[in-house]
Image (cartoon, rainbow, N blue to C red):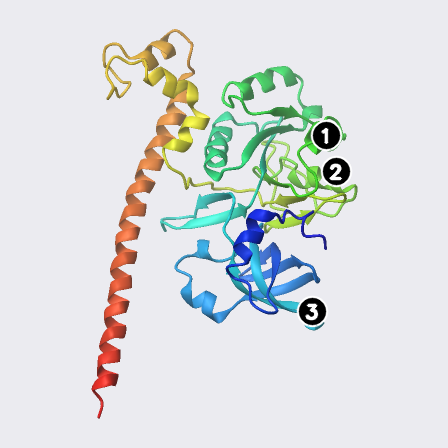
């Protein structure tokens, strides 16, 4: 495999020299299945597992390889297997908080140049969900692109594009029909040798159909959606990196029923620039935008310049991010305490060993 076509460049080459040993080579993670990995390397596809040392030193699941990561491997070409010894620094990463109450980062895709935020122009079109995806996209470091799929099912595409524009300021928006192969030329401009595109969206929006159109073959399974709510079932069950003919890769992801934020307040600036600009015009710098006099945000809602639903979405995400920050701080303190307890335990064991006659 040509590693340059898969995204290998001088950034990763520089960091490889810090980890390279005789027999070690770079590879890119194409799929993960319960900490067993498929890696693309100069030897082709290899099935890989992390080394015992790496597993022992990992402090969280974010320290393990994710789809899109460049890793340092010790290959065994004759067995089509390899051992992963290190994850190279990530240029970008699209993350979410793990489900339920645990405060931990889950890396969905890494080293992504462009994120296609795929929405269906059917009953599943949802601006509030798009705002959430945009917030995480700005946090990731990748360039977001809004893809409005299923244009063939929408009676008023222009109106839906306008709604998307009202929440995705400065973000390219493309209305396409993957099924009818309509409007896809604009998307192909984002895919080329050395580039990585990730697709994110809920089940049934047509992510796999889009990828199949790039491949020119039905490599990925596609499924039907329910007529009553346009929701699909999870055909793609794991994240996977797909090499595109001519160079470049696309990362497909399962439709996510739950997308909890893993971001900070700065990320809201990219998604809610209009609200933050209004807030800067309020009479009081600590305005809560409730009943304070001279509130520019409240005035904009009253005169129709700002959608009340969008403002409620902003407050909800802001509250979620603040709560996450508190939980992160608590987790950091607990991790630090556990680290020193372990150090004290090792020190005690060493003293006992040294005191033996």
The reply to whether discs 2 and 1 touch (Cβ–Cβ < 8 Å) is yes
Query: Which element type, helix, strand or loop, lies under badge 3?
Result: helix
The numbered dot on residue 184 is 1
Query: Which element type, helix, strand or loop, lies under badge 1?
Result: helix
Query: Which element type, helix, strand or loop, lies under badge 2?
Result: helix
Mark 3 crowd level (few <14, some 14–19, many ≥20, 10 Å Cα): some
* Pointer 3 or 1: first along the chain: 3
* Pointer 2 or 1: first along the chain: 1
The numbered dot on residue 77 is 3
Name the residue that disc number 2 marks: 213
Residue 46 position, x and y percent, is 66, 63
The reply to whether discs 3 and 1 touch (Cβ–Cβ < 8 Å) is no
Q: Nearer the viewer, mark 3 or mark 2?
A: 3
Residue at (67%, 28%) from the top-left corner?
A: 150
Residue 73 position, x and y percent, is 58, 64
Mark 2 crowd level (few <14, some 14–19, many ≥20, 10 Å Cα): some
Name the one closer to the observer, 215 or 23: 23
* Whether residue 139 can be seen here: yes
């Amino acid at each position: 495999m040509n590693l340059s076509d898969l995204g290998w460049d001088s950034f990763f080459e520089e960091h490889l020299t810090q980890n390279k040993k005789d027999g070690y080579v770079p590879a890119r993670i194409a799929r993960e299945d319960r900490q067993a990995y498929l890696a693309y390397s100069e030897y082709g596809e290899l099935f890989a597992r992390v080394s015992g040392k790496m597993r022992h030193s990992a402090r969280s699941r974010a320290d393990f390889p994710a789809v899109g990561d460049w890793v340092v491997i010790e290959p065994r070409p004759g067995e089509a297997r390899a051992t992963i010894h290190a994850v190279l620094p990530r240029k970008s990463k699209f993350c979410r908080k793990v489900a339920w109450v645990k405060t931990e980062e889950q890396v969905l895709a890494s080293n992504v140049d462009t994120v296609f935020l795929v929405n269906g122009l059917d009953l599943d079109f949802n601006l509030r969900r798009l705002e959430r995806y945009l917030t995480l996209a700005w946090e990731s470091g990748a360039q977001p692109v809004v893809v409005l799929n299923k244009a063939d099912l929408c009676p008023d595409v222009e109106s839906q594009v306008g709604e998307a524009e009202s929440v995705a300021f400065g973000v390219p928006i493309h209305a396409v029909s993957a099924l009818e192969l309509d409007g896809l030329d604009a998307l192909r401009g984002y895919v080329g040798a050395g580039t990585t595109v990730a697709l994110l969206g809920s089940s049934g929006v047509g992510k796999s159909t889009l990828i199949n159109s790039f491949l020119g073959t039905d490599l990925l399974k596609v499924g039907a959606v329910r007529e009553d709510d346009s929701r699909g079932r999870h055909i793609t069950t794991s994240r996977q990196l797909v090499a595109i003919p001519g160079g470049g890769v696309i990362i497909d992801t399962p439709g996510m029923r739950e997308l909890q934020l893993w971001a900070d307040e700065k990320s809201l600036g990219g998604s809610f620039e209009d609200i933050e600009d209004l807030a800067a015009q309020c009479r009081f710098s600590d305005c809560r935008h409730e009943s304070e006099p001279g509130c520019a945000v409240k005035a904009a809602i009253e005169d129709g310049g700002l959608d009340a639903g969008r403002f409620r979405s902003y407050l909800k995400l802001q509250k979620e991010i603040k709560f996450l920050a508190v939980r992160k701080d608590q987790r950091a303190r607990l991790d630090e305490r556990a680290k020193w307890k372990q150090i004290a335990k090792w020190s005690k064991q060493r003293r006992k060993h040294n005191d033996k006659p």
